[in-house]
Image (tube, grey):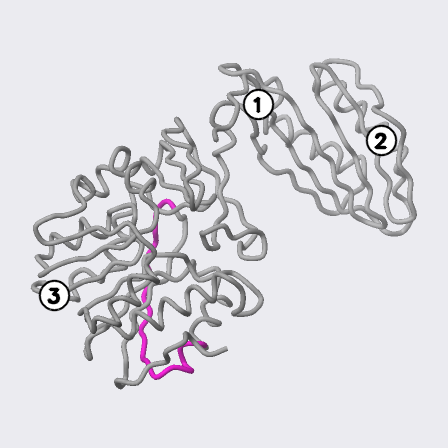
Amino acid sequence: MTWPQSSTSIHTYLWEFLVPENGSFDFGTACDQTKERFSKCLRCSVKPLGEEIICDTFSRRSFIGEPQAVISLRWQKPSIVTLNLEVPVQPHSESFFNLDTARVIETELRKSFNATRSKVLPPLKRGGPVDPYRYLNASGCQSGCYSSEFDDRLLEYDVEEVLADVQSPFQKVEILKTKNFGNLLVLDGLQNLAESDIVYTETLMHRGTIDYMNKDVLILGGGDGALLWELLKEKPSFVTMVDIDDVVMQLCKKHMRSACGTALDTYDGPNYKIIVDDCMKILKSYIDDKKEFDYVFGDLTDIPVSDAPIGQIWDFMKSVLALSLQVLKKDGKFLMHGNGVSSEPALQMFEAQLAKLQVSFSRSNAFVPSFMEDWVFYQIWKTNSEVHQNGLPE
């Protein structure tokens, strides 16, 4: 399902002011000052929109000005005043209201309100043919996670074109053409990999420090094909890749060629095989068959940003790790991505779980361009042959 191609976008400007708590701030006067200021900036009459709301804890009044600009002033008693402006912008035209104008309003209203502190944010841009794709969450996890497993920060991308917007049987798959990062794969609203992100793949595989020549490698996930493509350059004995979502692979084959090369052109190559299936099912079959690998990659979901190591995604991640350890050779390693360095509590939570297992681990990080922050990667290996059969302990 794709977004409707709106011809108009809405730019939302947000101000905040810290006003005195001594009773000198008068909301009615502030509304008059706001109305006067916007009448000048919008060059039109500004009229009240509905009745003023007055409560014990807050007061709010809204206005409307042509062309269809909506202004809302709210006083969260006793000291916080917020001001919102929603203004329509036609495609291929300059907005009659911009950030410079917003800063002028901030300066003038700060003085009028006798505020001790103020701030205005660049406009949030919604609507239009590409604006719905502009904002992504900074950190979190995929596979249908929602608010509690994101870190509530937004990243903004300069999207030139939407190359794909498809709901697969497993997740929402988008590929966006961006100015700064090339084509960007987005899964369930989270940036997954961009053409600019070779450092992500190289850090995940520890290129230059691990010798993959003549080794047997298993990739769990990795549907963008980048890890497979880079591993094949290291002359391994054989690489098996298991990803459940063929839609991702087909779209990346078409739109992410600089990242995946020709790796996704065939699913059965001379020294690799791609299996479209559930990795849990395949891991269990390998355990039954006593098949082992030198290296297993968990290129699946990120470590969830949550209050405790519980829930569907944590359970999935624990099970994948436990099963993967069972198919590793004695001196093998499990390699995975974690999350951003800004999500340190989630990373520490994960490491606390690892400490309860008979494993050792190392941690490295690298700045990933399209993620706009340092990302953390893990190497995990068994310290003896005994591993937990049923996932990480609670």
> Sequence-wise, which precedes: disc 1 or disc 3?
1
Distance between the alpha carbons at the discs numbered 3 and 2: 71 Å
Query: Which numbered disc, 1 or 2, marks the residue closer to the eye?
Result: 1
Indicate whether 309 appears above or below 234. below
Q: Amino acid at mark 1?
A: Ser
Residue visible at 63% across and 26% down in the picture:
101
User: Which element type, helix, strand or loop, lies under badge 3?
Assistant: loop
State yes or no: residue 360 in magenta: yes
User: Which element type, helix, strand or loop, lies under badge 2?
Assistant: helix
Look at the image and give the residue range highlighted in magenta.
Answer: 353-370
User: Quadrant of the rendered structure where residue 167 is?
Assistant: top left
Disc 2: which residue: 31
User: Quadrant of the rendered structure where residue 103 is?
Assistant: top right
Disc 3: which residue: 215
Distance between the alpha carbons at the discs numbered 1 and 3: 53 Å
Residue visible at 39% across and 26% down in the picture:
161
> Sequence-wise, which precedes: disc 1 or disc 2?
1
Camera-side residue of 114 and 308: 308
Whole-percent x and y of residue 357? 38, 81
Whole-percent x and y of residue 186? 40, 42
Camera-side residue of 299 and 94: 299
Disc 1: which residue: 9
Q: Is residue 371 left or right of residue 287?
A: right
State yes or no: residue 108 in magenta: no
Q: Amino acid at mark 3?
A: Lys
